[in-house]
Image (spheres, grey):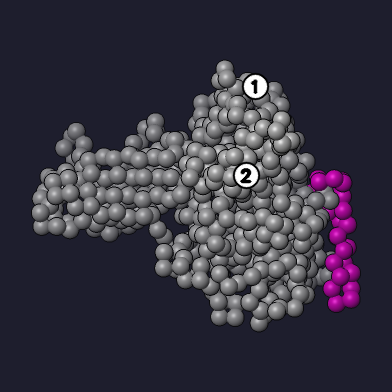
């Protein structure tokens, strides 16, 4: 049985599986003859076949209102259209009566990947999909839902830095290492400290002990700085105001941004020529100017590096190596800054575009063996143990193993009335699961009922287990009054569970259980005396209900994607 890893990226996506020697191999995007596919979707007017890939990206110049791109930046977020408008983009579209949002647009990308793999003889069904380490519960759930709607069996979600470290460490080392993964993708930034431990038998454990970052910081922000500069220079050279530039011109300028950024990674300067209304305008941009425009963005990434090191109680000298991952690390300013930050560490740029998807394929294989052994059919098992002496097939070694440790990137807890030693009470979040706890997590705590109605609200936040403030202020008090928690803690309401029973009396035991996995998170509230239980899967307005998932599954089951804009629909 084949399993697959999919890197669902902001700008590019890819798929990989393992070959007969258990080595990760990329399934090429034959539409563009590349190992990756542009994460861009074009919805042709009057057509039921979305176009995904490079040709879709090219259409952004001609029909920008029918092209969705950088959509991973908005998946699972609330108020996505407002966020996208700040980037000069859209996250929600109405195409011929169908309302498309970040989940369904991501579904189109995943379907295209599965379809072009299928055309090469691959049966893509069981998959692991990657996401940024700092993705919230909502963002992970939305990613999973996109895969399910695309008809995939999403075995697990893996953090991108963990996947990259797994790809790099797999069968590479025979000794313990501590690696900092600096992952700057198209729309997100992660920094993760990975411990690689090797026992006497050669078995490897890859443990992401600490992670941080910003899921609103990525290569697109460098693009936007360059985009704003080119717009300003164009307007200045032509003696007009930026507000007078029309959407077509904006699209023309936007199309120049990425190739200009790539060129400045290799050359000291570039002349950008913009032809509009038959008149060319040439703008020179130097590497030094680009670095000046974006220095604060690089500095932001270093602040996250410092934060992760401080919280892990480590220094730069504790890192054996620094692994650069993500296409945006190809900018020389990133390598130069990291080298300056880690003068005593080995700096490695290891296959920045494909390390994540290769690691996802390895993790998919590990996941099946550990969690889904029933998916390994007898034929596959027989193939793994065939002797090369008898039939020439290469025998797969049954020696050292590689395992990964996945940890929580957020803390979770119920909002409850907390009694203090001085006799006072306060309504606060009592975290039960903390950042850094190993997945899967299941933790319980017992509280006391205050009436026959028990309603418990649950929150995620970024409070640390060893922080001075054990309790965190929720978003609302018991009576619904709005409260103001510390913004640095990123407090987010996740859902509520409710019990109402005349048998519940004040003082009765109420057991609250929080379960967190990479597949999803949920809570239960139990009245211990009667056994009454209510459960709640964490849901939000930025993800689909089960009914909406099924409706979209039906809709997408008859939708086919394509990579060619000009192909006639049959």
Q: Toward the viewer: 512 or 529?
A: 529
Residue on which disc 2 sits: 361
Which residues are drawn in magenta?
A: 265-289
Residue 206, percent across and down? 56, 31
Residue 438, image quadrant: top left
Above or below: residue 504 compared with residue 207: below
Secondary structure of the magenta portion, mostly? strand
**Would residue 382 be counted in the magenta stretch?**
no
Considering only order in the chain, which callout, 1 or 2, is on the residue closer to the N terminus? 1
The quarter of the picture where the C terminus appears is bottom right
Kindly state the secondary structure of the residue where label 2 is placed: helix
Q: Residue at x 71, y 44 (%)?
A: 25
- 484 left or right of 408? left
Q: Position of residue 87 (x, y in %)?
A: 63, 62
Image location of residue 556, percent across then percent down? 56, 70
Q: Residue furthest top?
A: 200
The reply to whether discs 2 and 1 touch (Cβ–Cβ < 8 Å) is no
- Residue at 85% in and 77% down: 277
Residue 536 placement: quadrant: bottom left
Q: Is residue 295 visible?
A: no
Which residue corresponds to the image point at 83% horizontal and 53% vertical from the top-left?
285
Q: Which residue is mark 1?
A: 174
Can residue 562 be seen here? Answer: yes
Relative height, residue 283 to residue 402 (above, below): below
Toward the viewer: 67 or 5?
A: 5
Tell me the CA gap for discs 2 and 1: 22 Å
Q: Is residue 302 left or right of residue 552?
A: right
Q: Nearer the viewer, residue 411 or 252?
A: 411
């Amino acid at each position: 049985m084949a399993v697959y890893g999919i890197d669902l990226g902001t700008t590019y996506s890819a798929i990989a599986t393992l070959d007969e020697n258990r080595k990760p191999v990329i399934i090429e995007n034959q539409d563009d003859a590349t190992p990756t596919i542009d994460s861009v979707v074009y919805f042709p007017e009057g057509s039921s076949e979305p176009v995904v890939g490079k040709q879709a990206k090219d259409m952004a110049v001609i029909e920008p209102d029918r092209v969705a791109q950088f959509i991973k930046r908005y998946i699972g977020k609330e108020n996505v259209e407002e966020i996208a408008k700040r980037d000069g983009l859209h996250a929600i579209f109405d195409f011929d009566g169908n309302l498309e949002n970040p989940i369904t647009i991501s579904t189109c990308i995943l379907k295209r990947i599965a379809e072009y793999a299928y055309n090469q003889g691959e049966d893509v069904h069981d998959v692991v999909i990657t996401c940024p380490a700092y993705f919230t519960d909502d963002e992970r759930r939305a990613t999973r839902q996109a895969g399910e709607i695309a008809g995939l069996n999403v075995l697990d979600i893996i953090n991108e830095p963990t996947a990259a470290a797994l790809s790099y460490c797999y069968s590479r080392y025979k000794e313990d290492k501590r690696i900092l993964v600096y992952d700057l993708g198209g729309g997100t930034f992660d920094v993760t400290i990975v411990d690689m431990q090797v026992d006497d038998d050669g078995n490897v454990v890859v443990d992401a002990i600490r992670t941080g970052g910003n899921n609103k910081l990525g290569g697109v922000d460098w693009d936007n700085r360059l985009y704003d500069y080119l717009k300003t220079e164009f307007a200045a050279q032509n003696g007009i105001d930026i507000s007078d530039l029309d959407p077509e011109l904006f699209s023309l300028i936007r199309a120049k941004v990425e190739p200009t950024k790539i060129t400045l990674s290799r050359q000291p300067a570039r002349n950008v020529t913009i032809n509009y209304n038959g008149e060319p305008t040439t703008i020179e941009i130097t590497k030094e100017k680009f670095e000046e425009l974006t220095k604060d963005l690089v500095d932001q990434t270093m602040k996250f590096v410092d934060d992760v090191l401080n919280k892990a109680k480590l220094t730069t000298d504790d890192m054996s190596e620094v692994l650069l991952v993500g296409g945006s690390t190809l900018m020389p300013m990133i390598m130069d800054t990291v080298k300056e930050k880690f003068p005593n560490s080995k700096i490695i740029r290891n296959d920045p575009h494909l390390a994540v998807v290769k690691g996802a394929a390895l993790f998919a294989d590990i996941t099946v063996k550990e969690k889904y052994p029933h998916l390994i059919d007898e034929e596959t098992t027989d193939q793994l143990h065939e002797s090369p002496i008898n039939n020439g097939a290469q025998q797969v070694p049954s020696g050292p193993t590689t395992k990964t440790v996945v940890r929580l990137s957020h803390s979770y807890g119920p909002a409850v009335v907390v009694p203090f030693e001085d006799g006072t009470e306060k309504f606060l979040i009592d975290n039960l699961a903390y950042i850094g706890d190993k997945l899967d997590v299941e933790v319980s705590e017992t509280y006391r009922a205050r009436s026959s109605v028990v309603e418990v609200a649950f929150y995620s936040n970024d409070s640390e287990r060893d922080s001075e403030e054990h309790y965190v202020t929720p978003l609302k008090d018991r009576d619904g009054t709005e409260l103001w928690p510390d913004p640095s803690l990123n407090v987010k309401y996740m859902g509520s569970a409710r019990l109402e029973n005349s048998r519940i009396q004040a003082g009765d035991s109420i057991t609250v259980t929080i379960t967190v996995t990479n597949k999803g998170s949920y809570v239960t509230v139990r009245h211990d005396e009667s056994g009454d239980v209510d459960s709640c899967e964490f849901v939000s307005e930025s993800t689909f209900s089960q009914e909406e998932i099924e409706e979209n599954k039906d809709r997408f089951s008859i939708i086919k994607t394509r990579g060619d804009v000009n192909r006639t629909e049959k």
